[in-house]
Image: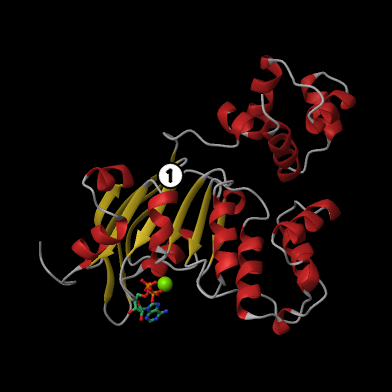
Amino acid sequence: MENIFSDQLTMLRQKKSLSQEIIAQKLFVSRQSVSKWERGDAEPDIDKLIALADIFGVDLNYLLAGQQSSKELLLKLIAVNKKFQNPVLRGVNLTIYGRDRIALLGSNGSGKSTIVNIIEGTLPTDSGQVEKYFDAKDDLNVMPQENVLIESLRLEEHIVLSASIQRVYSKQIVHDLLEKFQLKAQANIKISHLSGGQKRRLALLLSVIRTSKLLILDEPTVGMDLESIDFFWNYMDHIGGSVLTITHDFNQIDRYFNRVLLLKNGVIWKDETVAKIHSNNQTIEEWYRKYNRNEGEII
Ligand SMILES: Nc1ncnc2c1ncn2[C@@H]1O[C@H](COP(=O)(O)OP(=O)(O)OP(=O)(O)O)[C@@H](O)[C@H]1O
Ligand SMILES: [Mg+2]
């Protein structure tokens, strides 16, 4: 068993606001045992692991490896319609499973962010269904296209506040995040004084403070410098759960994602695996250009 388990245990326990004592009582073990598991000094028996997965409401695979089952159904959009002045979404059908790595592509104004807002629940649909098979309060993280930051706070204060709201605050977590996202030097700077790229990096940090079953990133790398973009994609390799990303960063799509969606004419025009595209000797960019030609065409 790798160390991922000890991190998962600590994270899930904090997320559920359960103390080591409570976990110990539920499993009929000593608090010291739970503490050793979290430090990675010892491992529980399989029956305790099963009981732990049950307590946290996650599957065993997720508890052990930080990854969900690829077959776990997470989200279904069924015939979703949305109109502003003009119709934007005209019958969007979309199913997302655990461990999907989805790139959502489409022209400016095609309705990508509208889909994100509908999934997040900040925008109502005109008709259609949005079925979430997870608790959106705990298991959905979103990095919106426009930063939602409290400009009057200092950077570290903002992280503390967001971590507290998400019930995962500890001094250690804040310290680790500042280090990992290379924002330590800016810890005491007011958000309003940060550069655009620094704000984007902070927005990303805030969206991954806690783990989630589904992480949605709306054009995360826009405004970031090359080093930050590299950092971002490397960081993505370490994210568990499903990820839906809107990006025009074609260099990376081939490497990171396993599924590509093309939103066109108000519907999911194409839903393809990256493997299939590659097997046709195409890059994602070539595939995108081919199918996104002639927006408005009927077939
Ligand atoms: N609140 C709103 N009121 C009126 N029109 C809106 C609203 N939100 C979105 N729209 C319109 O809906 C369309 C889709 O917008 P959306 O932001 O979803 O596009 P997008 O695919 O995310 O584009 P981009 O690549 O530029 O981010 C656009 O024409 C936009 O003007
Ligand atoms: Mg958008």
x, y percent for residue 31: 88, 27
Whether 24 is drawn above or below 258: the answer is above
32 vs 106, left or right, is right
x, y percent for residue 157: 80, 69
Which quarter of the image is occupied by the C terminus?
bottom left
x, y percent for residue 269: 22, 58
* Residue 131 in view: no
Amino acid on which the number 1 mark rests in the picture: Asp
Residue at mark 1: 100
Residue at 70%, 80% (x, y): give it: 194
Whether 40 is drawn above or below 78: the answer is above
x, y percent for residue 175: 81, 57
Q: Between residues 270 and 250, which one lies in front from this camera angle?
A: 250
Query: Which quadrant of the structure image shows residue 191?
Result: bottom right
* Residue 209 in view: yes
Helix, strand, or loop for circle 1?
loop
Q: Between residues 40 and 24, which one lies in front from this camera angle?
A: 40
Q: Residues within 10 Å of mark 1 (few under 14, many from 20)?
A: many
135 vs 2, left or right, is left
Residue at 43%, 44% (x, y): give it: 100
